Image: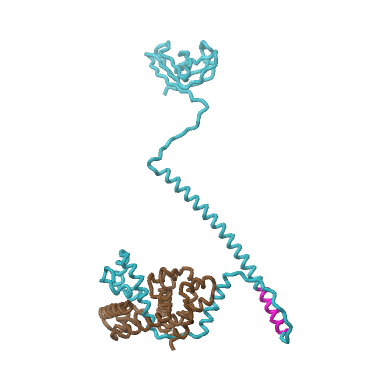
Chain colours: A brown, B cyan
Amino acid sequence: MDPIARQEPARQDTDEGLIRRILAGDETALGTLYDRYGGLVYSVANRILRDTGAAEEVLQDIFHQLWRAAAGFDAARGSLSSWLLVMARNRSIDRLRRRDLASAGDPMDLMPASGFNLENEAARNEMVAQVRRALGSLPEGQRQAMELAYFEGLTQTEIAARTGDPLGTVKTRLRTAMATLKKAFES
Amino acid sequence: MNGHPQFAEDFELYTLGVLDGDDKAAFEAHLAVCAECRRELEGARSRASLLGLAAVQASPRSEVREQVLDRFRVDRCAKQPLQAPTAARYRRSPWTPLWAAAAVVLLVAAAWLERENRRLEAGLAQLQATHVQLEASSRELEEESARAQAALDVLTAPETIQVELAPVAARPVPHGKAFYNASKGLLFYAADLPALAAGHTYELWLIPSEGAPIDAGLFNADLRGNGEVILPALPRGLTAKAFAVTVEPAGGVPAPTGPKVLIGPVS
């Protein structure tokens, strides 16, 4: 069963409204946001770290960070779901690669200026399906290069070293794949 | 797509940390000078993040939700002062001894918490006092800095005029000048001399290199304090060592007796 569908409560609150309630100390609002996005955050962390315990720690840290940084959230500036996905990926890659993508500075600085709003369950499920379809439609080399880039945090040079392909080939694959994905996301 | 298609997919790849080497350097150099591309980068971060949706959906253990909320409650409580315990309804039951024991434990815990709370509050009050002091010092520094800047502005402005002032003298300082030629004669001019009381006069003296001072003429100061002696009758060929002016009784005296008002050695 898809955990997103299972955990979605029958609520119509917007992310922004929930953040306001969290700031007022309302724990049920945090619970609602957790039910809405906890599965997404955990799934990204678990895919990157391949360690359920570590993924749960990342999940807890991000929601802790969310509540602590909530005052800086500005719905006009970006979407919470985009921020959570950026944080989930960066925090997990930090742990995996011992890099420092997300830990410095104000976490809300990572809030994309624009973003996809996934607060509606149907829109979220549709987007998940769309991304999977788009990634699945890529030729094997391109898909592998994109997955190494996103889920393992490798640079183009590191991907070339990992796959044994020439750097030029890897660059072309990454750019072609990204162009295809962008079209799919924007359609 | 913006106006720089050569970077088309670099935005997403850059936000994912994929670019390295020359590609990264070139892209960052372009970003530094292109506001349009910096805006584009924000959208790219969001698009790139969507790739995470491709992860196989998994569920954390149900306890994690409770742990997240527990942490929230702890944080929330830490932001609020501890509440004094309120009176609870007491009811007899077979569990009373157990409840009593629990109550003792709770009371001890409450007392400890109360003490901790007081200690923390005292620490907080001290910190707040320090904060207030620091704020006051900071304000003083800011005001001092503003005053220094305002002073500098006056000093450095081109239209600023400069005027030198000297102490206001109770009366002008008398001064005089003698032009003496041993064979041709003497001219003497004085200024800023105080007016003399009735029955007194100024007397000019030529002090020769040898011998007693020689009367070089009487004079009075006019309303502006000026006085002069022009070509007084003097023996010719005298070598002067100095000139002096004294205040003497009206009509003059053959040798100086009064206070010296002016004196000037021949250099």
Task: Look at the picture and state if A139 lies above or below B152.
Answer: below
Name the one closer to the observer, B55 or B170.
B55
Is A155 left or right of A57, judged from the image as shown? Answer: left
Name the one closer to the observer, B130 or A28.
A28
Q: What range of the chain is rendered magenta?
A: B96-112
In this rendering, does residue A94 appear at all?
no
x and y percentages locating residue B135 in the rendered image: 54, 57
In this rendering, does residue B90 appear at all?
yes
Q: Quadrant of residue B153?
A: top left
- Is A59 magenta? The answer is no
Task: Look at the picture and state if B163 lies above or below B100.
Answer: above
x and y percentages locating residue A145 in the rendered image: 31, 82
Name the one closer to the observer, A10 or B246.
A10
Q: Quadrant of residue A164?
A: bottom left
Q: Name the image quarter holding the C terminus of chain B.
A: top left
x and y percentages locating residue A17 in the rendered image: 48, 72
